[in-house]
Image (cartoon, rainbow, N blue to C red):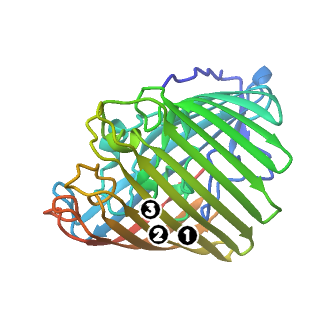
Amino acid sequence: MKTFGLTLGAALLCSAAAQADPLATPSMEGPIAANATPTTFDAGPLGNIYVTGAVSGLAFWQGDPEPGDRHTFVDLSNGQVSVQKTDGWFQFYVQAGEYSLPSLGAAYVKSGTLTNATFGVVPEGYIKIAPSGSFSIEVGKLPTLIGAEYTFTVENMDIERGLLWNQEPAISRGVQVNYTAGPLALSASWNDGFYSDRFNWLSGSATWTIDGANTLAFVGAGNIGKTGYGTFATPFAQNNGDIYNLIYTYTSAPWLVNPYVQYTDVPASTALGIPHGASTWGIGLLATYTVSPSFSLSGRAEYEKASGSAASGAPNLLYGPGSNAWSVTFTPTYQYKVFFARADVSYVTAGSVTPGDGLGPLFNSKSQARLMLETGIVF
C-alpha cells in the first residue's frame, strides 16, 4: 500500500468537529457507534481533515484449540488511527495500526503476527475522486464489496466474524467506481481478490434502497484468470473461484435485522492442479435489538455446506470436501460515549468432517465453544 503523505503544520487548529453524525467511513454496522464529534484539523485549502480510531483489547477462552493455539488469550484487537478528507472532488482515507481478526471455527492468531501476515500496518488506504455527489472513483487498498460483515471487530455486531465471512475476501488492492441514481447504488471494482497482488478479479454490487427501513443488495465477484499460489492472506482455492451474495437489511428502531445468502464456486483446473471443482452455499442471519441508548443485544446464526469429496480431489473449502457447519453467537454490548464493553458467547459444530481437516488438537474434533470479552474506546 502506498501511504498518502500529509503534513499538518503547527499552525493548524486541532478541535472537536462540529458534526451532527459520525463519519461514514469506516463503516460501522453497530451496535458500537462511531464518535459523532471526531477530531478535525482545519487544513486551510485542503479543508477539514478528520482523525478517528479505535483502541481495544480482548480476552477469551476456547475449547479444543488447534496445535499452536491455546485455551486462553489476552490480546490487542484494535490499535488503529484513521485520517480522512470527506468533501470536495479530492478525498482520501488512510487507516493505520495493529489489529486481530478473530473468526469462528478458525485458530486465533495474535495481532502482531496477524497484522504482518495479512494487510500490514496500513490495512486500508485510498484516494477518492468525486466530481459529483453521485459518481466517484477510488484507488488503493479497498474494503471488499462482498458479504454482510466488515473486517475489523468494532465495525460489527459480534466480536468474531462468522463462518460465511471465512469464504470472503476482506481487503483488496484495486480501483472501484461508484454511481448512485435515486434509490439504486452501483459499484464495480477491478482488484486482486484475496489480496493476491494479481489484478485478475472483478467485483460488483447493486443496492436498492426500497424505503427508509429496507434495502436489498446483490453482490458478485470472481477471478477472471488464474492465480497459481496462495499465502496466509490468500487462500489458494477461494482466490481462484467466484462468490455471490444476496443481502437484505431491515433497520427500524429498536431492530436491525440482516439475513443473507451466499454461494461460492471453485471450478476444476488442470493448470492449477484442481482435478475436481467444489462449491459452498450458506445462509446467515444477523440481528441487533437496542434495549436502551447504551445497551444492546446482538446475535448471529449460520449454516454452511461444501460440496465435493476428498476421493475426487476436490479442494477443501470448509472442514474437508463435503463437510457442513453451523454456528450461533450471542453478544450483549454496552457503550457510554466513546467507551464500550461487550461479550461474545459462540458455538460452532461441523458434520461430515474429513479426518485432518476438523477442529481441535488432532484436527478431528467437530465442535468448539468460545467466550470472548472486548473493551476499549472509539475516538
Residue type (three-letter) at the residue carrying disc 3: Gly
Q: Which residue is mark 2?
A: 302
- On the picture, is 227 further left or further right than 363? right
Q: Position of residue 254 (x, y in %)?
A: 71, 75
Q: Quadrant of residue 251?
A: bottom right
Callout 3 secondary element: loop
Q: Quadrant of residue 108?
A: bottom left
Nearest-to-viewer mark from 2 and 3? 2
Structural distance between the alpha carbons of marks 2 and 3:
8 Å
**Disc 2 + disc 3, Cβ < 8 Å:** yes
Up the image or down, 296 lies above or below 35; here it is below
Q: Residue furthest right?
A: 182
Q: Residue at x 59, y 44 (%)?
A: 145
**Disc 1 + disc 2, Cβ < 8 Å:** yes
Q: Residue at x 83, y 62 (%)?
A: 211
Residue type (three-letter) at the residue carrying disc 1: Leu
Q: Quadrant of residue 127?
A: top right
- Mark 1 packing: few (<14 Cα in 10 Å), some, or many (20+)? some
Q: Position of residue 70 (x, y in %)?
A: 21, 61
Structural distance between the alpha carbons of marks 1 and 2:
6 Å
Q: Which residue is mark 3?
A: 162
How many marks the image carries: the answer is 3
Of pointers 2 and 3, the one earlier in the residue sequence: 3
Q: Nearer the viewer, residue 10 or 33?
A: 33
Structural distance between the alpha carbons of marks 3 and 1:
10 Å
Q: Is residue 37 visible?
A: no
Of pointers 3 and 1, the one earlier in the residue sequence: 3
- On the picture, is 222 further left or further right than 31? left
Q: Nearer the viewer, residue 240 or 359?
A: 240
Q: Residue at x 20, y 70 (%)?
A: 365
